[in-house]
Amino acid sequence: MRLVRRDVPVSGLHPDLVGFRIAHLSDLHLGAPGRNGRAFATGVDLVVAEQPDLVCISGDLRARRRGDVALRAGLERLVAPLGAFAVLGNHDYADGHDPFADGHALSDLDGTPVRLLADTAVEVTRRGARVRVGGVAPRTFEATADERGADLVGDADLRILVCHFPPVLDRLRVGEWDLVLTGHLHGGQICVPYPGGKVRLAHRSREYLEGVYHRDGTTMHVSRGLGTTFVPIRFAARPEVTVLRLVAT
Protein backbone atom coordinates (compact mmCIF):
# COMPACT_ATOMS: atom_id res chain seq x y z
CA MET A 1 0.00 0.00 0.00
CA ARG A 2 1.25 3.46 -0.78
CA LEU A 3 -0.04 6.99 -0.47
CA VAL A 4 0.62 9.01 -3.62
CA ARG A 5 0.40 12.79 -3.61
CA ARG A 6 0.22 14.36 -7.06
CA ASP A 7 -0.04 17.94 -8.25
CA VAL A 8 -2.56 18.09 -11.07
CA PRO A 9 -2.54 21.09 -13.41
CA VAL A 10 -5.94 22.53 -14.35
CA SER A 11 -6.17 25.19 -17.03
CA GLY A 12 -7.81 28.40 -15.83
CA LEU A 13 -8.25 27.11 -12.28
CA HIS A 14 -10.35 29.44 -10.11
CA PRO A 15 -8.14 31.17 -7.47
CA ASP A 16 -10.31 29.75 -4.65
CA LEU A 17 -9.56 26.23 -5.90
CA VAL A 18 -5.77 26.45 -6.00
CA GLY A 19 -4.55 23.80 -3.60
CA PHE A 20 -7.91 21.98 -3.61
CA ARG A 21 -7.26 18.37 -2.60
CA ILE A 22 -9.15 15.28 -3.77
CA ALA A 23 -8.64 11.79 -2.35
CA HIS A 24 -9.12 9.25 -5.15
CA LEU A 25 -9.80 5.58 -4.38
CA SER A 26 -10.86 2.82 -6.74
CA ASP A 27 -11.35 -0.92 -7.23
CA LEU A 28 -11.94 -2.08 -3.67
CA HIS A 29 -13.38 -5.49 -4.69
CA LEU A 30 -14.52 -6.19 -1.16
CA GLY A 31 -15.71 -9.71 -0.44
CA ALA A 32 -13.32 -11.39 -2.87
CA PRO A 33 -10.62 -13.72 -1.48
CA GLY A 34 -7.36 -12.09 -0.46
CA ARG A 35 -6.31 -8.94 1.34
CA ASN A 36 -8.85 -6.54 -0.15
CA GLY A 37 -10.56 -5.82 3.17
CA ARG A 38 -7.28 -5.02 4.86
CA ALA A 39 -6.18 -2.83 1.94
CA PHE A 40 -9.42 -0.86 2.08
CA ALA A 41 -9.17 -0.33 5.84
CA THR A 42 -5.60 0.92 5.46
CA GLY A 43 -6.63 3.14 2.56
CA VAL A 44 -9.40 4.71 4.63
CA ASP A 45 -6.89 5.40 7.41
CA LEU A 46 -4.66 7.22 4.91
CA VAL A 47 -7.54 9.31 3.59
CA VAL A 48 -8.70 10.28 7.07
CA ALA A 49 -5.17 11.37 8.01
CA GLU A 50 -4.85 13.49 4.84
CA GLN A 51 -8.08 15.43 5.47
CA PRO A 52 -8.86 16.15 1.79
CA ASP A 53 -11.52 18.58 0.60
CA LEU A 54 -13.32 15.92 -1.44
CA VAL A 55 -13.32 12.11 -1.70
CA CYS A 56 -14.13 10.22 -4.92
CA ILE A 57 -14.31 6.44 -5.49
CA SER A 58 -14.28 5.31 -9.11
CA GLY A 59 -16.05 1.96 -8.99
CA ASP A 60 -15.80 -1.78 -8.30
CA LEU A 61 -16.66 -1.37 -4.64
CA ARG A 62 -17.48 -4.97 -3.84
CA ALA A 63 -17.43 -8.40 -5.46
CA ARG A 64 -19.59 -10.39 -3.05
CA ARG A 65 -22.28 -9.54 -0.53
CA ARG A 66 -20.03 -10.71 2.28
CA GLY A 67 -18.00 -7.55 1.62
CA ASP A 68 -20.90 -5.26 2.51
CA VAL A 69 -20.06 -4.98 6.22
CA ALA A 70 -16.44 -3.94 5.55
CA LEU A 71 -17.56 -1.61 2.77
CA ARG A 72 -20.06 0.28 4.88
CA ALA A 73 -17.74 0.40 7.89
CA GLY A 74 -15.06 2.07 5.76
CA LEU A 75 -17.44 4.42 3.97
CA GLU A 76 -18.74 5.66 7.31
CA ARG A 77 -15.31 7.20 7.94
CA LEU A 78 -14.97 8.92 4.56
CA VAL A 79 -16.22 12.34 5.56
CA ALA A 80 -14.86 15.41 3.77
CA PRO A 81 -15.82 19.12 3.83
CA LEU A 82 -17.22 19.04 0.27
CA GLY A 83 -18.50 15.47 0.49
CA ALA A 84 -17.65 11.97 -0.66
CA PHE A 85 -18.95 10.47 -3.91
CA ALA A 86 -18.75 7.13 -5.68
CA VAL A 87 -19.74 5.44 -8.91
CA LEU A 88 -20.19 1.74 -9.49
CA GLY A 89 -18.05 -0.45 -11.73
CA ASN A 90 -18.75 -3.54 -13.80
CA HIS A 91 -17.92 -5.89 -10.91
CA ASP A 92 -20.55 -4.22 -8.75
CA TYR A 93 -23.05 -5.68 -11.22
CA ALA A 94 -21.14 -8.98 -11.64
CA ASP A 95 -20.57 -7.97 -15.26
CA GLY A 96 -17.47 -9.68 -16.59
CA HIS A 97 -15.73 -12.97 -15.89
CA ASP A 98 -14.75 -12.57 -12.24
CA PRO A 99 -15.16 -16.01 -10.62
CA PHE A 100 -15.45 -14.36 -7.20
CA ALA A 101 -18.45 -12.15 -8.03
CA ASP A 102 -21.71 -13.54 -6.66
CA GLY A 103 -24.04 -11.90 -9.15
CA HIS A 104 -25.84 -9.69 -6.64
CA ALA A 105 -25.65 -6.06 -7.70
CA LEU A 106 -24.75 -3.32 -5.26
CA SER A 107 -27.74 -0.98 -5.47
CA ASP A 108 -27.09 1.82 -2.99
CA LEU A 109 -24.86 3.27 -0.29
CA ASP A 110 -27.70 4.45 1.91
CA GLY A 111 -26.78 5.05 5.52
CA THR A 112 -23.23 6.15 4.70
CA PRO A 113 -21.86 9.65 4.05
CA VAL A 114 -20.81 8.58 0.54
CA ARG A 115 -23.26 9.56 -2.18
CA LEU A 116 -23.68 7.23 -5.14
CA LEU A 117 -23.72 9.00 -8.52
CA ALA A 118 -25.45 7.07 -11.30
CA ASP A 119 -25.74 9.32 -14.36
CA THR A 120 -26.23 12.23 -12.00
CA ALA A 121 -24.29 15.32 -10.96
CA VAL A 122 -24.19 17.51 -7.88
CA GLU A 123 -22.74 20.94 -7.17
CA VAL A 124 -20.79 21.91 -4.08
CA THR A 125 -18.94 25.11 -3.21
CA ARG A 126 -15.55 25.98 -1.80
CA ARG A 127 -15.20 29.58 -0.70
CA GLY A 128 -16.44 31.48 -3.77
CA ALA A 129 -16.01 28.68 -6.30
CA ARG A 130 -18.56 26.17 -7.57
CA VAL A 131 -17.50 22.54 -8.09
CA ARG A 132 -19.64 20.16 -10.13
CA VAL A 133 -19.15 16.41 -9.64
CA GLY A 134 -20.76 14.04 -12.14
CA GLY A 135 -20.82 10.25 -12.17
CA VAL A 136 -21.44 7.84 -15.05
CA ALA A 137 -23.11 4.48 -14.35
CA PRO A 138 -21.11 1.55 -15.77
CA ARG A 139 -23.92 0.04 -17.79
CA THR A 140 -24.64 3.42 -19.37
CA PHE A 141 -21.02 3.66 -20.46
CA GLU A 142 -20.86 0.11 -21.79
CA ALA A 143 -24.23 0.06 -23.56
CA THR A 144 -24.07 3.46 -25.24
CA ALA A 145 -21.23 3.75 -27.69
CA ASP A 146 -21.50 7.54 -27.97
CA GLU A 147 -22.17 8.24 -24.27
CA ARG A 148 -20.20 11.35 -23.35
CA GLY A 149 -21.85 12.46 -20.16
CA ALA A 150 -23.32 15.49 -21.92
CA ASP A 151 -26.41 15.50 -19.72
CA LEU A 152 -24.21 15.84 -16.64
CA VAL A 153 -22.33 18.90 -17.83
CA GLY A 154 -23.16 22.20 -16.18
CA ASP A 155 -21.70 25.62 -15.63
CA ALA A 156 -19.20 25.54 -12.76
CA ASP A 157 -15.71 26.75 -11.88
CA LEU A 158 -14.44 23.16 -11.73
CA ARG A 159 -16.09 20.17 -13.39
CA ILE A 160 -15.11 16.67 -12.21
CA LEU A 161 -16.35 13.51 -13.91
CA VAL A 162 -16.07 10.15 -12.12
CA CYS A 163 -16.32 7.05 -14.31
CA HIS A 164 -14.98 3.54 -13.81
CA PHE A 165 -13.57 3.20 -17.32
CA PRO A 166 -10.54 5.20 -18.57
CA PRO A 167 -11.64 5.21 -22.24
CA VAL A 168 -14.30 7.74 -21.25
CA LEU A 169 -11.59 10.34 -21.93
CA ASP A 170 -11.86 9.59 -25.65
CA ARG A 171 -15.61 10.26 -25.61
CA LEU A 172 -15.61 13.72 -24.05
CA ARG A 173 -16.23 16.86 -25.99
CA VAL A 174 -13.55 19.52 -25.70
CA GLY A 175 -14.15 21.75 -22.68
CA GLU A 176 -16.86 19.61 -21.03
CA TRP A 177 -14.84 18.42 -18.01
CA ASP A 178 -11.71 19.71 -16.34
CA LEU A 179 -10.80 16.55 -14.40
CA VAL A 180 -11.76 12.91 -14.92
CA LEU A 181 -11.22 10.21 -12.27
CA THR A 182 -11.17 6.54 -13.31
CA GLY A 183 -9.75 3.15 -12.34
CA HIS A 184 -10.63 -0.37 -13.57
CA LEU A 185 -7.20 -1.58 -14.72
CA HIS A 186 -5.30 -2.06 -11.43
CA GLY A 187 -2.11 -0.82 -13.09
CA GLY A 188 -1.89 -4.26 -14.68
CA GLN A 189 -2.14 -5.96 -11.22
CA ILE A 190 0.64 -8.48 -11.99
CA CYS A 191 3.63 -6.99 -13.78
CA VAL A 192 7.12 -8.16 -14.71
CA PRO A 193 9.68 -5.35 -14.25
CA TYR A 194 12.58 -4.83 -16.61
CA PRO A 195 15.12 -2.00 -16.84
CA GLY A 196 13.21 1.11 -17.80
CA GLY A 197 9.73 -0.37 -17.64
CA LYS A 198 7.54 -3.38 -16.98
CA VAL A 199 5.38 -5.88 -18.80
CA ARG A 200 1.80 -5.87 -17.57
CA LEU A 201 0.19 -9.30 -17.63
CA ALA A 202 -3.31 -7.83 -17.61
CA HIS A 203 -4.77 -5.15 -19.90
CA ARG A 204 -1.63 -5.08 -22.03
CA SER A 205 -3.31 -3.33 -24.95
CA ARG A 206 -4.92 -0.52 -22.96
CA GLU A 207 -3.79 3.02 -23.70
CA TYR A 208 -4.54 4.45 -20.24
CA LEU A 209 -3.27 2.21 -17.44
CA GLU A 210 -2.33 4.38 -14.47
CA GLY A 211 -1.33 7.91 -13.59
CA VAL A 212 -2.13 11.24 -15.21
CA TYR A 213 -3.12 11.90 -18.82
CA HIS A 214 -3.99 15.12 -20.65
CA ARG A 215 -6.18 15.60 -23.69
CA ASP A 216 -7.68 18.77 -25.17
CA GLY A 217 -7.59 20.67 -21.89
CA THR A 218 -8.93 17.78 -19.78
CA THR A 219 -6.81 15.98 -17.19
CA MET A 220 -7.55 12.36 -16.29
CA HIS A 221 -6.23 10.40 -13.33
CA VAL A 222 -6.29 6.59 -13.49
CA SER A 223 -5.93 4.96 -10.08
CA ARG A 224 -4.24 1.60 -9.56
CA GLY A 225 -6.88 0.93 -6.96
CA LEU A 226 -6.74 -1.02 -3.73
CA GLY A 227 -8.01 -4.53 -4.40
CA THR A 228 -7.47 -7.51 -6.66
CA THR A 229 -9.67 -9.65 -8.85
CA PHE A 230 -9.37 -13.08 -10.53
CA VAL A 231 -6.26 -13.88 -8.46
CA PRO A 232 -5.59 -12.35 -5.00
CA ILE A 233 -2.11 -11.18 -5.97
CA ARG A 234 -0.45 -7.93 -6.99
CA PHE A 235 3.12 -7.71 -8.19
CA ALA A 236 4.93 -4.53 -9.24
CA ALA A 237 1.55 -2.76 -9.15
CA ARG A 238 1.18 -1.75 -5.53
CA PRO A 239 -2.27 -0.71 -4.30
CA GLU A 240 -2.59 3.02 -3.84
CA VAL A 241 -4.57 5.87 -2.41
CA THR A 242 -3.96 9.07 -4.34
CA VAL A 243 -4.39 12.63 -3.10
CA LEU A 244 -4.58 15.05 -6.01
CA ARG A 245 -3.72 18.70 -5.34
CA LEU A 246 -4.99 21.10 -8.00
CA VAL A 247 -2.60 23.71 -9.36
CA ALA A 248 -3.20 26.43 -11.93
CA THR A 249 -1.60 26.46 -15.37
Image (spheres, rainbow, N blue to C red):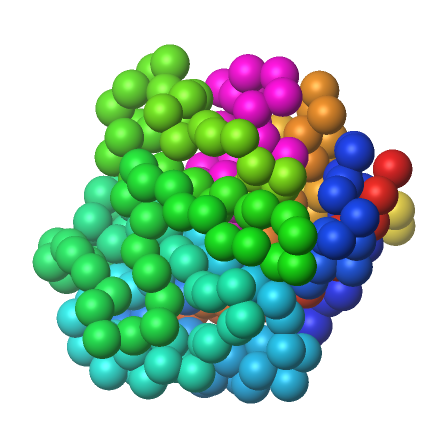
Please say if 126 is above or below 177.
Answer: below
Looking at this view, is 208 or 214 the one in front?
Answer: 214
Which image quadrant is residue 72 in?
A: bottom left
Q: Is residue 179 left or right of residue 87?
A: right
Which image quadrant is residue 110 in?
A: bottom left
Q: Position of residue 95 (x, y in %)?
A: 23, 43
Residue sticking out furthest to the left: 104
Please say if 141 is above or below 120.
Answer: above
Residue at 64% across, 85% down: 49
Q: Is residue 93 left or right of residue 153?
A: left
Instruction: Confirm whether residue 133 shows in the render.
Output: yes
Q: Magenta stretch: residue 91 in it? A: no
Q: Position of residue 53 (x, y in %)?
A: 61, 66
Residue at 73% across, 52% down: 17
Residue at 33% across, 84% down: 73
Looking at this view, is 188 or 70 the one in front?
Answer: 70
Looking at this view, is 62 or 163 the one in front?
Answer: 163
Residue at 34% across, 29% down: 141
Highlighted range, magenta:
161-185
Q: How many numbered markers are drawn?
A: 0
Q: Position of residue 163 (x, y in %)?
A: 44, 41
Which image quadrant: the C terminus? top right
Q: Is residue 67 left or right of residue 19?
A: left
Residue sticking out furthest to the front: 128
Please say if 179 is above or below 76.
Answer: above
Q: Position of residue 137 (x, y in %)?
A: 30, 40
Q: Magenta stretch: residue 179 in it? A: yes
Which image quadrant: the N terminus? bottom right
Instruction: Confirm whether residue 33 shows in the render.
Output: no
